[in-house]
Image (cartoon, rainbow, N blue to C red):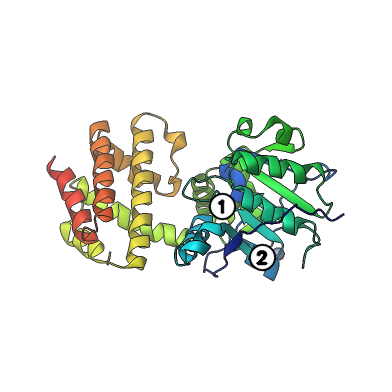
Amino acid sequence: MVHTTAGGTSASEVRSCRPTSDRPTIGEATTHKTITDGTTGSGPPSSQLPDFCGHCSNCARIALAQDLEARVAEAIEARENLRDTDKKETRIFVQTHPDVLVIPPDPPQLMIKVDQVRQVIQHIYYRPAEGRESVYIFTSSAFMKEAANSLLKVLEEPPEFATIFLLTENPGELLPTIRSRSMIFTLGALPSAEIEGWLAQLRPDWNARQRALVARLSEGSMGRALSFDLEGYVASRSHALVVLKAALGAGDHGELFKTTESYRPGAEGREKIESLLRTLYLLLEDLMCLQSGAGQLVRNTDILGELQKMAQAADFAWVQRAAEGLGEVERGLRRNLLRSLSLDAFATALERA
Ligand SMILES: [Zn+2]
């Protein structure tokens, strides 16, 4: 049946749909602890992985929304460029596939607003354009009061061809009346052994060491594991090791400067250094695990021997100083300090200390 809203909505929408080179993935929702499914009678969840092939045009388009932060940022930027009067009435959506609408919290309040829910209500009773089902994903459970009440209306009578996902880390944030109309799935992190098992089937191109590494780095998320950029990670890590070894006084400075020199200004350089910093933090965590006798928690298992040597050369206080130093580098980057210089400074300051 068709549901009509009194008065409709005057809000227009900004949808981000710029294609990216991101690799597709599943399991986007695993950073959130719970998924609520607003459909009626949709049956028990499948015990198998979702049928995400990652290659067909449906999967490829849906996967464009995976880097949600970037897509939302694009939509916000597009709204910023509108005339003031339009800006006020424009709500943020991400839609990279005609049958999948992602509804993020709308800035500046970062809450789901009533106009966003009204848009959902306007679209949800139309049959999906291409797929068998249409999917609506609310990525936050922070609803403005009016928005929550509006959502309740659609949950009372959802069309059978639409599924609404409400992602939340805290189901208590949702109205009890919303919760009672939902099926609740609690998503926990998968043990890395299980992910390794899946990868053996799904990524036979990776060897056992690589699969063990990826399983540990994907924090219990199968989707993250499947789309893991192993090559990029290993490249970043080899640079991170050069920096850390120099900081430990074990590497030679020629190599350090040659490495840090490759971190150039511009957007590409920014991404490169961000992934370097993430990798540096990961390595410091591994060193800390080794130092505190929790070697089973080490994630970079494929270079365990190397890490053990480094863990012996460093002590807890050094790791702590290194972590603080990385924080310093990050702050420097925000002030647009020259990247290579701040990396050099990071390594040499630790060495002197
Ligand atoms: Zn597919």
The residue at which mark 1 appears reads as 225
Residue in the foreground of this view, choosing between 255 and 185: 185
Query: Residue, x 57% and y 57% (percent of image)?
Result: 91
Residue 232 spot, x, y in % from top left: 43, 61
Residue in the foreground of this view, choosing between 23 and 292: 23
The residue at which mark 2 appears reads as 97
Name the amino acid type tagged 2: His
Query: Residue, x 23% and y 52% (percent of image)?
Result: 332
Secondary structure, mark 1, is helix
Q: Can residue 83 be seen in this view?
A: yes
Residue in the foreground of this view, choosing between 252 and 58: 58
Quarter holding ligand 1: bottom right
Query: Residue, x 66% and y 65% (percent of image)?
Result: 97
**How far is the residue under mark 2 from the one under mark 1?**
23 Å
For the N terminus, give its image quadrant: bottom right
Residue 17 spot, x, y in % from top left: 57, 67
Q: In the rendered view, does 30 fall on the left or right side of 283?
A: right
